């Protein structure tokens, strides 16, 4: 019973408000119909009474329009932001690809410039496609093989210098032994005209990226900064290929010879494109000639040869 009375009291003001609204609408319709012909004082009275409702309705309409406009602007900004993010990501990818193409173009230009400067060689461009993690400084794999005319022991170079030689050939790829490999052996010499000291460049485990030039006489004319090139001996590497520069010198374990630490011309940590020397029109180096003997030494050699021949003749007669 008490709940019903409470609900009746709460619904009372709502009923009066509804009646007031209906009455106001009736007055508006009635006086609007009459106002087509004449305006009366009662019309002004009704307008005054309904002014607050009109203001409230106008305010609500403006707020609704403003809210709708804000919602539309937020949705538009969100969509534009999404489109801009996609465009930024696409531009970032295109920029990365452009930088990669630019770097590749620079490397290929370097190889092309080298090819034009060494007319005595036939070069085949190749790309590094693999490295063995266990032999990172020993071997690489390139994307050229037997179908491209690649054979074992062909030298591999870049525009800056010697890389190594082909050690294994597959149908479409080949394995290259780097000059950093401890099993590698490259006949070299000091390029300086006053020196021309010969030696052998081989890899070392102490410093994998800096091989050593060994078998150098202790009193040989070798200076830090001297250029080291291939000597051409051995039949694998043509003469004159840049290997590197002397970075430091030290005595070997025996103390009779010295070792030159070589800073390679090629940056093996950034090796991506190489060239294979498939043919060389360079003449092989002249064989090492024996030093001419003095007159006394020549006579002694002739006497020794005659004695050896006499001994051989006696042995045959017996």
Image: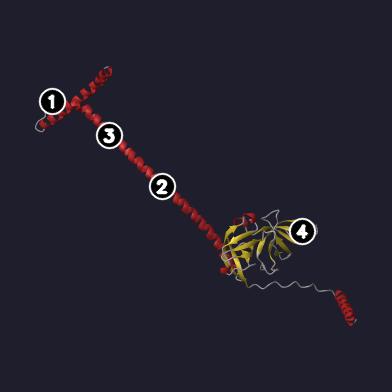
Residue drawn where x is 60% and y is 61% of the image: 141
Quarter of the figure with residue 153: bottom right
Quarter of the figure with residue 22: top left
Residue drawn where x is 75% and y is 58% of the image: 259
Measured in 3D between alpha carbons, the distance from the residue under mark 2 to the one under mark 1, in whole angstroms, is 61 Å
Q: How many labels does the image show?
A: 4
Identify the residue under disc 2. Answer: 84
Q: In which quarter of the image is the N terminus?
A: top left
Does residue 11 appear to the left or right of 258 in the view shown? Answer: left
- Tell me, yes or no, if residue 175 can be seen here: yes
Q: Which of marks 3 and 4 is nearer the N terminus?
A: 3
Q: Does dot 4 land on a helix, a strand or a loop? A: strand
148, above or below 305, in the image? above
Does residue 312 appear to the left or right of 43 in the view shown? Answer: right
Q: Does dot 2 land on a helix, a strand or a loop? A: helix
Give residue 108's position: percent from left, percent from top.
55, 62
Measured in 3D between alpha carbons, the distance from the residue under mark 2 to the one under mark 3, in whole angstroms, is 32 Å
Residue drawn where x is 65% and y is 65% of the image: 241
Identify the residue under disc 3. Answer: 62
Measured in 3D between alpha carbons, the distance from the residue under mark 2 to the one under mark 4, in whole angstroms, is 65 Å
Identify the residue under disc 4. Answer: 258
Extreme residue in the left direction: 37
Give residue 120's position: percent from left, percent from top.
61, 71
Whether residues under marks 2 and 3 lie with C-beta atoms below 8 angstroms apart, the answer is no
Query: Which label belongs to residue 42?
Result: 1
Whether residues under marks 3 and 1 lie with C-beta atoms below 8 angstroms apart, the answer is no
- Tell me, yes or no, if residue 194 can be seen here: no
Measured in 3D between alpha carbons, the distance from the residue under mark 3 to the one under mark 4, in whole angstroms, is 95 Å
């Amino acid at each position: 019973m008490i709940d019903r009375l409470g609900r009746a009291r709460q619904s009372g003001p709502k009923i009066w408000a509804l009646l007031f609204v209906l009455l106001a609408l009736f007055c508006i319709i009635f006086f609007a119909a009459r106002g087509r012909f004449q305006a009366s004082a009662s019309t002004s009275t009704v307008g005054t009474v309904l002014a607050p409702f009109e203001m409230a309705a106008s305010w609500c309409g403006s707020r609704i329009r403003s809210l709708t406009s804000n919602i539309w602007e937020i949705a538009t900004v969100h969509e534009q932001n999404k489109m801009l993010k996609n465009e930024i990501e696409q531009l970032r990818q295109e920029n990365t690809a452009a930088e990669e193409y630019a770097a590749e173009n620079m490397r290929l230009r370097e190889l092309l410039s080298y090819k034009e400067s060494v007319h005595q060689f036939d070069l085949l461009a190749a790309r590094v496609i693999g490295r063995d993690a266990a032999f990172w400084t020993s071997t690489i794999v390139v994307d050229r093989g037997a179908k491209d005319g690649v054979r074992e022991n062909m030298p591999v170079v870049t525009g800056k210098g010697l890389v190594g030689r082909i050690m294994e050939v597959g149908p479409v790829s080949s394995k290259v032994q780097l000059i950093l490999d401890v099993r590698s052996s490259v006949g070299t010499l000091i390029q300086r005209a006053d020196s021309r000291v010969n030696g052998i460049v081989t890899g070392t485990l102490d410093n994998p990226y800096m091989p050593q030039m060994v078998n150098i006489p202790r009193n040989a004319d070798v200076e830090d900064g001297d250029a080291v090139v291939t000597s051409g001996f051995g039949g694998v590497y043509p003469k004159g290929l840049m290997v590197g520069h002397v970075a430091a010198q030290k005595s070997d374990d025996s103390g009779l010879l010295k070792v030159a630490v070589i800073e390679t011309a090629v940056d093996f940590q950034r090796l991506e494109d190489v060239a294979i020397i498939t043919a060389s029109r360079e003449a092989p180096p002249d064989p090492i000639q024996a030093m001419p003997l003095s007159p006394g030494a020549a006579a002694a050699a002739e006497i020794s040869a005659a004695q050896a021949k006499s001994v051989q003749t006696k042995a045959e007669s017996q």
